[in-house]
Amino acid sequence: MFALCAGACLLLLCACSAPDSKLAPVNDFELSRYLGTWHEIARLDNSFEKGLSKVTAEYALRPDGKVAVANKGFNAKKQKWETATAVAKFAGDSRTGALKVSFFRPFYGHYLILELDRENYSYALVSGGNTGYLWILSRSKTLDPKTLGQLLAKANALGFDTAKLVFPEQ
């Protein structure tokens, strides 16, 4: 738990600057369709998720219009689940996939949805605002190879080092 929170704090401190201009979030975003559970298919490894498997992110609308975030992963070394909770809010227009996430208020970090399955909201390519943070998320525990390949190609074109991606056990 401490590692998740400490790492999240580090991400937020690094993400306080403006997001990388080449990382454009999706438009015509619908938060209501994005809410729910997402499975982490791949990530650029980071200190707050190192060694975690079966990673999920749960997004739920709060009464105040913000989004409750619950990230969970299994730490095999410690043989226990680790959870980190946060609050997210839109960085601007609610139809744009750019949010700010805070694990430690009042500090917020970037959460940019760079690619999204527009039909079913079944996969997403997400960045922390720079090329050091990347996640490939799916509604299911697996992602078909064609879709994964397309997401990897997009990430690579945006400047992410996809050779360093970690594919955690689901």
Image (tube, helix red, strand yellow):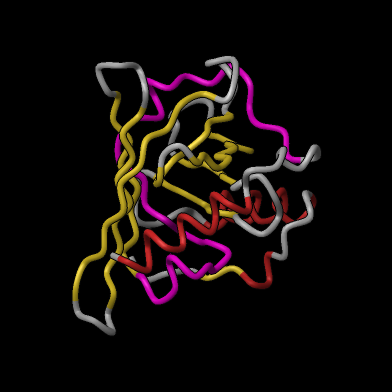
> Left or right: where does residue 160 sit relative to residue 15?
right
Q: Quadrant of the C terminus?
A: bottom left
Above/below status of 21 relative to 93 = below
**Whole-percent x, y for residue 24 in the image:** 72, 33
Residue 71 at x, y percent in the picture: 33, 51
Q: Going 73% across and 40% down the picture, which residue do you hit? A: 23
User: Is 23 on the left-hand or right-hand side of 34?
Assistant: right
Residue located at (53% from left, 70% from top): 166
- Which quadrant: the N terminus? bottom left
> Observer-nearest residue: 118 or 166?
166
38 within the magenta span: yes
Residue name at image x 30 percent, y 46 percent:
85
In this picture, is 34 found above or below 45?
above
Indicate whether 51 appears above or below 152: below
Quarter of the rendering containing residue 20: top right
- Residue 27 inside the magenta-drawn segment: yes
Looking at the picture, how far across and down is residue 132, in whole percent? 66, 59
- Outermost residue, left side: 80
Q: Residue furthest front?
A: 106
Residue 148 lies in quadrant:
bottom right
The part of the image, by quadrant, that contains residue 106 is top left
Q: Which residues are magenta?
A: 23-52
Farthest residue, direction bottom? 77
Left or right of 17, for residue 7:
left
Query: Residue 29 location in percent, x, y?
Result: 53, 21
Image label count: 0
Q: Residue at x 33, y 40 (%)?
A: 69
